[in-house]
Amino acid sequence: MKTEAKKFIQLKTTIPGPKATELLRKKEQNVPRGPFNTLSTFAAKGEGALLTDVDGNTFIDLAGAIGSLNVGHCPPKVVEAIKAQVDQYIHPCFHVMMYEPYIQLAEKLNEITPGTHHKKTFFLNSGAEAVENAIKIARKYTGRKAIISFERGFHGRTLLAMSLTSKVKPYKFGFGPFAPDTYKMPYPYYYRKPSGMTNEELDAEILRRLEDFFVSEVPAEEVAAIIMEPVQGEGGFIVPSKTFVQGVKQICEKYGILFIADEIQTGFGRTGKMFAMEHFAVVPDLITMSKSIGAGVPISAVTGRAEVMDAPNPGEIGGTYGGSPLGCVAALQVIDMLRQEQLVERANVIGQTVMNRFRQLQEKYETVGDVRGLGAMVAVEFVKDSETKAPNKELTAAILQECHQRGVIVMSAGIYSNVIRLLTPLVITDEQLAEALDVVEGVISELA
């Protein structure tokens, strides 16, 4: 571990400080306990990869609002675009009087998403809404009802999205009954595959079980779509093989099933490609997007084959605030930033740096079980020992808590809550990344 004086992290109080403590008291009185919070403090200012709280403590942010801030906190070009838009109009509602930024952003997403076919795009507010509407469109187009998602997948907290989500606690427990005609299939988790089985054998077995599902459970003729995260986010940053993803797509094509790529966390440069599906040379029929599309302004999108997107009749999809002008102008600037500042390429540099650090720790400590990721979407999984690979949730929680007290924001993930995931803004400097990783490495070295 390096021991230079910190340049970016500035801690004036313990966390939470006095102002944050008073706000926490008010939160307890006025906000329900359901929404979770990673840190027990409150933001006062964000810039790039840095967040300062109400007590003047400055953190290096490696969580990026759960992957919503690929271009960082308050990027000046986005802020300027939002301010200019506010002076013109805030929200005439696209369903009442249309506005040009909506059309400009739809045109841009049709251009940059995978595939050269004719595409169309419409906008909503959140990732869960995008998922729900992609399912509606798929059902309308195919005339079928069944939807297949994957174990450990996360698609949102609304009823249908929650039904497609895999983790029981905290997302599903006590909230049933769930939406009907939703089913889950295995997704390759190579670190935890059966002993003696190769990755290729695991892929083949899961694809075979998917084919068997059409015989034993639901006929393929009744399946509208298969929805997949190209890299599982909340599930623990599980990266499948190209063989597996292409195998699922081939099964979809064989039976006339639509392939939906959930790129809500993986999109907009996070994995070292503009969209993660590009790594697998697969062109989805529909793509759901949100999080980093608007640099923190709520907006989501569904882009897909024109003939599929046109299946719903006027009024059957939409929403009052969908595709707000503020979100549209922000997203247009985000796309320009990703290209002009070469942030997609930057994701690969960040990812390699983080992977190298974590793999060195993996060689030292038995509790560092697996290091994996794609581009700047990197995770480390903690176990109790290398033989049983028993999940070490307690160690993970302790590492997170200590990192927060030392000024680095990180989050957990995984079905067993034993994974630390990094979703650093792609605008983070080399110096900021090195300082943050020094802290994380020091904490792991002390506790592992």
Image (cartoon, rainbow, N blue to C red):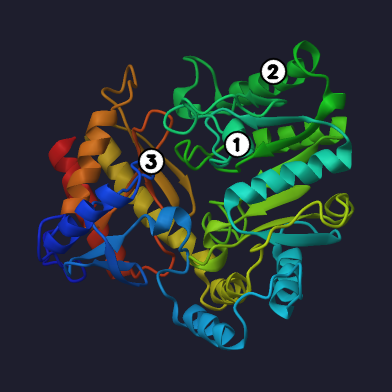
Residue holding disc 1:
159
- Compare residues 283 and 227 and report the one nearer the observer: 227
Residue holding disc 3:
34
Q: Residue 209 has which mark?
A: 2
Q: CA–CA distance between discs 3 and 2?
A: 37 Å
Q: Amino acid at mark 2?
A: Arg
Q: Position of residue 330 (x, y in %)?
A: 56, 74
Q: Could you tell whether 411 is left or right of 318 in the image?
A: left
Q: Could you tell whether 15 is left or right of 101 in the image?
A: left
Q: Position of residue 236 (x, y in %)?
A: 44, 37
Q: CA–CA distance between discs 3 and 1?
A: 16 Å
Question: Element under label 3?
Answer: loop
Q: Earlier in the sequence, mark 3 or mark 1?
A: 3
Q: Quadrant of residue 212?
A: top right
Q: Nearer the viewer, mark 3 or mark 2?
A: 3
- Compare residues 93 and 435 and report the one nearer the observer: 93
